[in-house]
Image (cartoon, grey):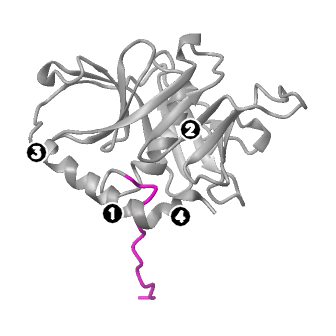
Amino acid sequence: MPIELILSPVMRPLVMAKAVLFHPHRRASRYVPHIIELPEENVSEYVLLKRFGSGSKIFDVYDTENGSLPLGSNDPSKKLFWFVRSRAVKGAYKMYSSSITGTGPEGEDEPVAAIRAGLRSNVLLIRAPGAPAAELGWHIIGHRVDANDSYRMFTMADGFTYQWTSKGKWLEKVHNVGEKESEVRERIAQVIPNGVNGFTLRVDETKIPREMALGSALCSHIDQWNTNIEVGGIYYARQPQQVRWKRD
């Protein structure tokens, strides 16, 4: 049984309390940062989808080939990455790459990254061929709110802060963070939800490794974008509205 189910009676009130504590800061932090939009050219597109029959335990990642295959290849072997959920922790996944397989001591696949989504989210980059060695290691994801939105934030080796927004689901590289009107938010990726099945990620890979973009986006998919209170979605997920069906 996932540990979140055991802790849920305790954590749900804490999540609500944290959402309430965010409110005064939201009202006191009104400013208009400068936005640099995500360009249309030189943007890669990937789709992350639940594997059939796995529930939410396995997600596969495919290249959409610039949108020509919006749901990925018809051949499951063409997946680029896959995420496998921990049995013990609902928000914990290991990320594997199709280009790095059979490297374990007994020929087993070894993860290229590990993620943990929740009130203390993080991404551990273990191997990312397209990323500088300095990016390998832990990336702690924090929470922040202002009058504009709520965010999941982390820092990369270049010293910049990166944040996933709740509105629009943008990944922004933030220059002059916290400097209000002097703050510049450069949009380098965006997530488009695919219902309950996953999401499509558009990302400028010259700005961030795709492994980090995918891993941090999955954290937000699990804990940020699936709740009405913008925090603690793994404990306080949005419930689908039940509408009675009838024939007109």
Q: Disc 3 marks which amino acid?
A: Arg
- 3D distance between C-alphas at marks 4 and 3: 33 Å
Q: Can you identify the residue that label 4 sits on?
A: 5
Q: Disc 2 marks which amino acid?
A: Ile
Residue that sits furthest to the right in the current view: 106
- 63 displayed left or right of 146: right
Q: Earlier in the sequence, mark 4 or mark 1?
A: 4
Which corner quadrant holds the N terminus?
Answer: bottom right
- 3D distance between C-alphas at marks 2 and 4: 19 Å
- 3D distance between C-alphas at marks 4 and 1: 14 Å
Q: Earlier in the sequence, mark 4 or mark 3?
A: 4
- 3D distance between C-alphas at marks 2 and 1: 24 Å
Q: Earlier in the sequence, mark 2 or mark 4?
A: 4
Which corner quadrant holds the C terminus?
Answer: bottom left
Instruction: Give yes or no for residue 19 being in the magenta stretch.
Output: no
- Label 2's element? strand
- 3D distance between C-alphas at marks 1 and 3: 22 Å
Q: Can you identify the residue that label 3 sits on?
A: 27
Q: Disc 4 marks which amino acid?
A: Leu
Q: Earlier in the sequence, mark 2 or mark 3?
A: 3
In this picture, which residue range is highlighted in magenta?
232-248
Where's residue 47, x and y in %?
A: 58, 40
Disc tally is 4
| Residue drawn at point x = 67 percent, y = 54 percent | 87
Q: Earlier in the sequence, mark 1 or mark 3?
A: 1
Q: Can you identify the residue that label 2 sits on?
A: 115
Q: Can you identify the residue that label 1 sits on?
A: 13
> Would you place residue 38 above or below residue 14 in this image?
above
Where's residue 235, x and y in %?
A: 44, 59
